[in-house]
Amino acid sequence: MTKIICISTSPRKKGNTMLAMEEMAKTIQENGGESEIYSLAGKTIASCRACNACNKTGKCAIDDGVNEMAEIIKNADGMIIGAPVYFGTARGDCMNFLQRLGMINLSNQRFLDGKVGGPIAVARRGGHTATLSEMLMFFFINGMIVPGAKYWNMGFGRLPGEVAEDIEGVENFKSFAANVLKVAKQMKK
């Protein structure tokens, strides 16, 4: 079965980004795929130290959960990552995670090459496109395939649950998740 990992980088376990992840995981399952949701809430994801340990061992020297997530992603067919927008950009934990995952990928025969996925962003008002652009760089430089959706992968909401009121945003998340699964299935043939 085609498996897509959904990762919420929000510090809120039950916030809008997690709600978006739940909608996408449900869409993936409804379309015949397998999906698991992971949250970085409660974790402190450190930035890369440029120690190059990953080049020697294939793992990051920092023990904060990124190595375990890398193994989960390595065994999946795709990955969707969601970030809340803070001050017009992705949260630091999100970018720390992506940058370290990228370094692990480079030291492990580029296991992300050909995997399918992409980012989504949730914000109160603005900064969505800057956040999506920032996160997309990770997917492209790691050889991943990013399908489109009906519109940009963004939702509006501040208080927990408000993103559900953004009907167009939720529909875009579902469209994106369905397309990630569709392309990942094609890649397995």
Image (cartoon, rainbow, N blue to C red):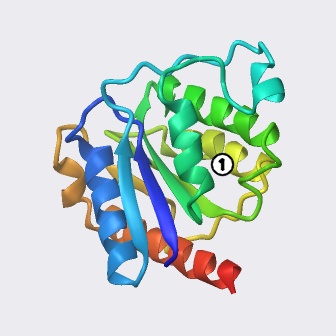
Looking at the image, residue 105 sits to the left or right of residue 175; the answer is right
Looking at the image, residue 64 sits to the left or right of residue 173; the answer is right
Q: Residue at x 51, y 23 (%)?
A: 92
In this view, the residue in front, 183 or 71, is: 71
Q: Residue at x 48, y 38 (%)?
A: 127
Q: Check disc 1 and give the amino acid type.
A: Leu
- Give residue 167's quadrant in the image: bottom left
Where is residue 168 shown, x and y percent of the image? Answer: 33, 68
Name above or below for residue 21 compared with residue 90. Answer: below
Name above or below for residue 184 compared with residue 52. Answer: below
Q: Which quarter of the figure is the C terminus placed in?
A: bottom right
Name above or below for residue 102 compared with residue 109. Answer: above
Looking at the image, residue 54 sits to the left or right of residue 123; the answer is right
Where is residue 159 shown, x and y percent of the image? Answer: 18, 38
In this view, the residue in front, 28 or 120, is: 28
Please tell me whether mark 1 sits on a helix, a strand or a loop: helix
The residue pinned by badge 1 equals 136
Farthest residue, direction front: 57
Question: How many numbered marks, from 0 up?
Answer: 1
Q: Is residue 129 visible?
A: no
In this view, the residue in front, 74 or 121, is: 74
- Judge the density around disc 1: few (<14), some (14-19), many (≥20) Cα neighbours within 10 Å: some
In this view, the residue in front, 64 or 84, is: 64
Q: Residue at x 41, y 71 (%)?
A: 34
Q: Residue at x 78, y 43 (%)?
A: 108
Where is residue 178 shown, x and y percent of the image? Answer: 46, 77
Where is residue 166 shown, x and y percent of the image? Answer: 26, 59
Q: Is residue 163 visible?
A: yes
